[in-house]
Image: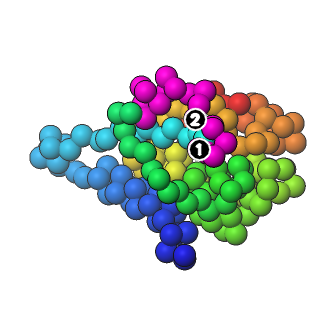
Amino acid sequence: MASTRSCLPALLNFLLICVTLLSSLSGAAAAKSYRKPNIVLILTDDLDIAIGGLSPLNKTKKLIGDAGISFTNAFVASPLCCPSRASILTGKYPHNHHVINNTLEGNCSSKAWQKSQEPHTFPALLQSYGGYQTFFAGKYLNQYGHSEAGGVEHVPPGWNYWVGL
């Protein structure tokens, strides 16, 4: 069980290391033979088969899902929205990023999260170490935009283009 729990953070860390190493290649030969890959992460939730979450997304499934891959098993660091999203952004388990629920008091988009974790999320690292242009659209963390968390004026570090909800 412990090995399956470590899959997501290990995979994110591995991906980050690979992108960082590849982007640091130097020399004319390396520049000609290596083209930095595009990375697209589409994050959705509540798509459980048992509750029919994918049913309203038939066009999306046809356009994206049928051309890709489906997983019959999935593992997450936390079944709660904000701690899970924080794990995806940081590659850390909730006991390490300290987001414990979907409230500001639970560190969801809190000032403490913004100060300690946001500067080290994978988009911030891809931007600063890999030279990537980054774009975000959609739901960020549950309490994003709350006045006590800096309001919608707060744009997390690491994003060149930001349309966060």
State the image coordinates of residue 76 (x, y, percent, origin top left).
59, 59
Q: Residue at x 77, y 61 (%)?
A: 100
Q: Is residue 51 magenta?
A: yes
Range shown magenta: 48-65
For the residues bearing labels 1 and 2, Cβ distance under 8 angstroms: yes
Is 78 above or below relative to 37?
Answer: below
| Residue 86, placed above or below residue 28 | below
* Residue 5 found in image quarter: bottom right
Pinpoint residue 29: horizontal percent, then vertical percent. 12, 46
Using the image as rendered, state which of residue 85 and residue 71 is in the foreground: 71
Q: Is residue 9 above or below residue 132?
A: below
Please provide percent x and percent y for residue 43: 56, 41
Which quadrant of the rendered structure holds the C terminus?
top right
Rendered-image quadrant of the N terminus? bottom right
Image mark count:
2
Q: Is residue 35 magenta?
A: no
Residue 133 shows in this picture: no
The residue positioned 51% from the left and 61% from the top of the image is: 8
Q: Please report whichever mark, 1 or 2, sits nearer to the chain's N-terminal start.
A: 1
Marks 1 and 2, Cα distance to the nearest angstrom?
7 Å
Q: Residue at x 17, y 48 (%)?
A: 30
**In the image: residue 37, left or right of residue 88:** left
Check residue 49 in the rendering and tell me which mark sits there, or answer none. 1
Q: Residue at x 32, y 49 (%)?
A: 23
For label 2, the residue is: 54
Circle 2 Cα neighbour tier, 10 Å, few/some/many (<14 / 14–19 / ≥20) = some
